[in-house]
Amino acid sequence: MINKPTEQPPANAGGGVAQAKPPAGGSGGASAPAPRIKGTGTAFVVNGQGNLVTNHHVVSKCDDVYVWSGKKLFPAIVIASDPGNDIAVVEAPDLSVRKIARFRNDGPQLGEDIMVAGFPYATMLGGSLKTTFGNVSSVIGLENNASDLQISAPIQPGNSGGPIVDQSGAVVGVVTSSINNEYLLSGGGNIGQLMNFGVKSDVVVVFLKSHRIPMEIVSAGEVMSNAQLAADALDYTYLFVCA
């Protein structure tokens, strides 16, 4: 019914993180040899301890996990996971935190403008942050799932775990999935248009609190331009690597 947009890199993908070599030894960064990458996603920092939120399905099949920053792979560990809501938290203790994402104190509003930040198709498009824009299409997900929201912002494989932010840069959700068009067509329907989903920020906050993971909650602030939103997300959103 849905697609979970975690990128599975091709064996001979050109360029990008799949062929980037981590530094040999030293603090802050993975040691050689480079890990064999199974897939990539997105994660974002929520506190100064190096805790990052991503999706459960991004981490569930990994033997090792890393955060990519400054052309280095920083080792991380999974410290909490919720398969039902597709949330996970990893800790990258050696990551130098520049900024943290903050969660909005109320839920997403129907019709409000949002931005998605992430790393789609990282093995082809490289390890630079990509952003898309849209709005909140629905405040419920598939089959009336009240924990989810639907968004019109385009997402691709690799966007899983990325933040969905409002016009002030506050997090209102986390990208989880998109509609499976093959499923729609098999039932005699049409291809879905911009039917993408995320888990609401208040669900994520409850999860973080239950695991005593620090985070910041804020009210909606001043409206920022799209360029300002992207620059803000650049400092707390990271490419997640599953090996």
Image: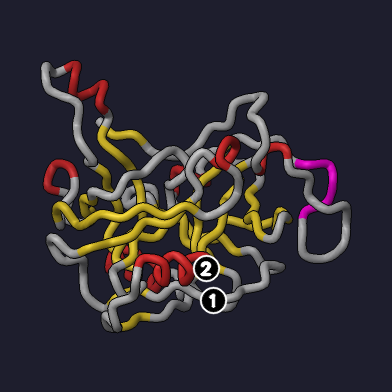
- Look at the picture and state if 144 lies above or below 3: below
Distance CA(mark 2)–CA(mark 1): 5 Å
Give how far across and how far down residue 118 sits, in percent. Answer: 46, 53
- Observer-nearest of 191 and 133: 133
Q: Which amino acid does label 2 sit on?
A: Tyr
Seen as rendered, the residue at the extreme right is 25
> Residue 236, which numbered label?
2
Q: Which amino acid does label 1 sit on?
A: Lys
Q: Residues within 10 Å of mark 1 (few under 14, many from 20)?
A: some
- Observer-nearest of 49 and 95: 95
Mark closer to the chain start, 2 or 1: 1
Q: Mark 1 points at which residue?
A: 99
| Secondary structure that dominates the magenta span | loop
- Look at the picture and state if 185 lies above or below 233: above
Mark 2 touches mark 1? (CB < 8 Å):
yes
Task: Tell me what residue is drawn at x 43 percent, y 47 percent.
Answer: 160
Give how far across and how far down residue 164 sits, in percent. Answer: 34, 60
Give how far across and how far down residue 145 sits, in percent. Answer: 17, 49
- Look at the picture and state if 145 lies above or below 181: below
Magenta stretch: give its range: 30-34
Going by the image, does 214 lie left or right of 33? left
Which quadrant is home to the N terminus? top left
Which quadrant is home to the C terminus? top right
Mark 1 element type: loop
Task: Tell me what residue is drawn at x 19 percent, y 26 percent.
Answer: 191
- Look at the picture and state if 223 lies above or below 164: below
Mark 2 element type: loop
